[in-house]
Amino acid sequence: MLVALLIAGALVSRAGEPEAPEAAATIGGTTISSAEVDDKARMPLFQIRVQAYETRLRVLSGLIADELLKREAAARQTTAEALLRAEVQQKAAAVTPEEVQAAYENVKARFKDKPEAEVKTQIESELRQQRLAERRQAYLKELKAKAGVQVLLEPPRLAVDPGEGFARGPKDAPVTIVEFSDFQCPYCVRVAPTVKKLNELYGDRVRFVFRDMPLPMHPLAPKAAESAACAADQGKFWEMHDRLFAASGKLEVAELKAYAGELGLDRAAFDSCLDSGKNEPRWKAGKAAAEGYGISGTPAFFINGRLLPGARPFEVFAEIIDDELARAARAKPAGQK
């Protein structure tokens, strides 16, 4: 009892005192605080948390799938194995000879030392496995919806400032996506149709913010970024954005000016804007922000603060967006739409 009172008294006496930073190391009279270490290691530590979350989520997904199959099999008085045969193996889309031939044409140069029949057999097997995986995923999605599955694991998030990024979608949208991108990056070009499809599908439920991050190995990207900002001065950022990604790397200054003409922009104003370099600080700010978040490659997306690097398939984006929309719906007070 006496010890407890002494501890309580000490806590009270120190309540008004500012806490000294926890020291991580001392060098003579110099202290390196844990806060400094955490600040420098913020992104590597965040990425470790993301990896840990993804590992837990994979395990959880497996457990959910096992439970759903067990329940459905019991309801239908069958086994999980028989259920999968009926709902996955028998319902997966067939692989056609035309699809095998098309795939073979794309890879035959790499396998010229192998018999054509052998390569086609391998292709057909791989396509079949892909179809089975897709059908299994679709079937599990049906079972999840039927059972009302809610994933409650909280993903790691990073507070990302949209800064001076160009945005479309309402500010109060339940999902905000911030993309750091480079108009000369082939992976950014590859993911652009996916981003467009997401915007069309989700509409006002998603706010999309584009920020520039020209990479050092892409010398044409900075001026391309400036050209998009110059187009924004005339209300056509997204039109120029789409045109630049469709340009297949043809991003010389003369070509940028030609694209402005194609889009019906005031050429004199656009050319003057582009030649002046007035929008250089904008892409530099985007690049600095990305580097501050530890981003070293493009494209990089933050979906409500959840990091998604690279040109991922549409389904990967949709899964995260759907999860965020479900979380937002659960967080609303009862009766609120």
Image: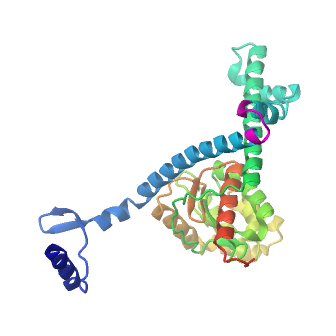
In the image, which residues are magenta?
74-81
Q: How many marks?
A: 0
Q: Position of residue 112 (x, y in %)?
A: 71, 17
Q: Nearer the viewer, residue 15 or 269?
A: 15
Q: Report whether residue 279 is seen.
A: yes
- Could you tell me which residue is drawn at 57 percent across and 67 percent down? 283
Horizontal relation, residue 74 to residue 33: left or right: right
- In magenta segment, residue 289: no
35 relative to 142, above or below = below
Horizontal relation, residue 334 to residue 298: left or right: right
Location of the N terminus (image quadrant): bottom left
Q: Residue furthest left?
A: 28
Q: Position of residue 252 (x, y in %)?
A: 68, 57
Q: Position of residue 205 (x, y in %)?
A: 74, 69
Q: Nearer the viewer, residue 244 or 250?
A: 244
Horizontal relation, residue 67 to residue 142: left or right: left
18 relative to 115, above or below = below
